[in-house]
Amino acid sequence: MTTAVVVGSGPNGLAAAVRLAQEGVRVRVLEARETIGGGTRSGERTLPGLIHDDCSAFHPTGVASPFLRSLALEEYGLRWLWCEAELAHPLDSGAAGVLWRDVDRTAAHLPPSDGRTWRRVFGPLSSRFDRLADDVLGPPLHVPASPLALAGFGAQALLPAPWTAGRWRGERARALFGGAAAHAFSSLRTPFSSAIGLMLIAAGHAHGWPVAEGGSQAITTAMARLLERLGGAVETGVEVLDLGQLDRPDLVLLDTGPQAAARILGDRLPHRTARAYRRYRYGPAAFKVDLAVEGGIPWTDEHCRTAGTVHLGGTFEEVVAAEEAVFRGRMPRRPFVLVGQQYLADPSRSAGDLHPLYAYAHVPHGYRGDATEPVLDQIERFAPGFRRRVRARHVRTVAGLRADNANQVGGDITGGANTVRQLVLRPRPALDPYATGVPGVYLCSAATPPGAGVHGMAGFHAAQSALRHLAKR
């Protein structure tokens, strides 16, 4: 029987393992930590009974993923839950831009001219989102299933974010788009910086930004259960430092960053690949603060009290300036902060009137300072009296993120810098970006196309590449 080892149990590693097991390959997944999941782990971080997500929290690409949708993970315990509003972006005026699943409701909350523009931009994108996702999340080289839709999206995605934001006059629409675009962890003044904002908002209208009941850990737990049903196995507490540790499997798939892959493969890597992997760039970092809050957050804008995600950064221009500073290695006084109120959709994460609050700030790569107070200041800015409700906190510094998850190099939670070059040619220029050049060994992490997100598509495509290799033997 053909054998395979997958190193790393994040969503991509497990997706790769499941895909191989579907084809009759005997698969072992080796995870260095004692719990599986990589960036999708969850647990008690502040007070007993409060469940916090370690990294990934909201999953628009999870429900939209062509591969995850095909797995029927609901049969293995996964249940998606939605808040009333997907996203809110408050302003100092007391108003907020709000994203609902309903495009018309979102547009109606904006000034009339901005609402009409919102419908023109996101109505078509959301109505054909599933076809678009098949192409955007597809392998780098493929015949598009919907070439016209992909071309239309590509023309808009190519633009710098300020050009796209210029389509709206009011601050609410501009800020709502800017906060979504900031998920790129990059400069918003460069080409392609509109892409992630357009995709996330379109996904929000098409599928929402759901959470997994019980914590994001439920996603990878369901995937592991499916893998076991297919005959695969997951072993925790096994750190792979060298390919020689493995018992000569037919295939090896690495759910690791390129630099870690270079260390594991050592002199086996072709020189050109090794050089590309070692030069792979990582982007800005996250600084994580988990809080136990009594009674929830007293947001000034009432819609923020119903939103799963709240973006804190002020106006579009403030968000752009803060992201530019972080991209250039400078810590802004008011960083962009993402707040997660998953408990609004999933009350099982709370304990009575004590609720888990998820927050992180964008900070420079490798940041050594303490961003706790800037995070709390940004929340207090839009929710006066918030600090008085905090009962406990758990801080995860940039160094702490890296220590907890080896793939989060320098605190980068997106798997690599979203520069123009790496958006198009990650992790290196190659016809098959998953192949390492070592026979039978493939890279399947977020450093490979289509990049970050709990969608499993990088793992799926890497497994497809490995299966093609087997077919040629």
Image: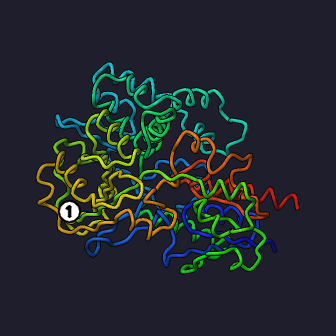
Query: Which residue shows up at 44% across the image and 62% down it?
Result: 216
The x, y position of residue 26, in whole percent, is 73, 73
Q: Quadrant of the N terminus?
A: bottom right
Q: Nearer the viewer, residue 346 or 420?
A: 420
| Left or right position of 292 against 61 | left
The x, y position of residue 451, in whole percent, is 56, 50
| Left or right position of 272 against 13 | right
Is 143 above or below relative to 29? above
Which residue is label 1 attached to? 293
| Left or right position of 141 against 449 | right
Query: Mark 1 falls on what kind of element?
Result: strand
Is 277 above or below relative to 312? below
Is 155 above or below relative to 346? above
Query: Which residue shows up at 62% across the image and 52% down it?
Result: 448
In the image, what residue type sits under mark 1? Val
Q: Nearer the viewer, residue 322 or 196?
A: 322
Q: Nearer the viewer, residue 92 or 274?
A: 274
The x, y position of residue 295, in whole percent, is 17, 60
The x, y position of residue 246, in whole percent, is 70, 78
Is 458 above or below relative to 139? below
Q: Nearer the viewer, residue 387 or 352?
A: 387
Query: Does residue 307 appear in the picture of this structure?
Result: no
Query: Which residue shows up at 37% across the image and 21% down it?
Result: 116
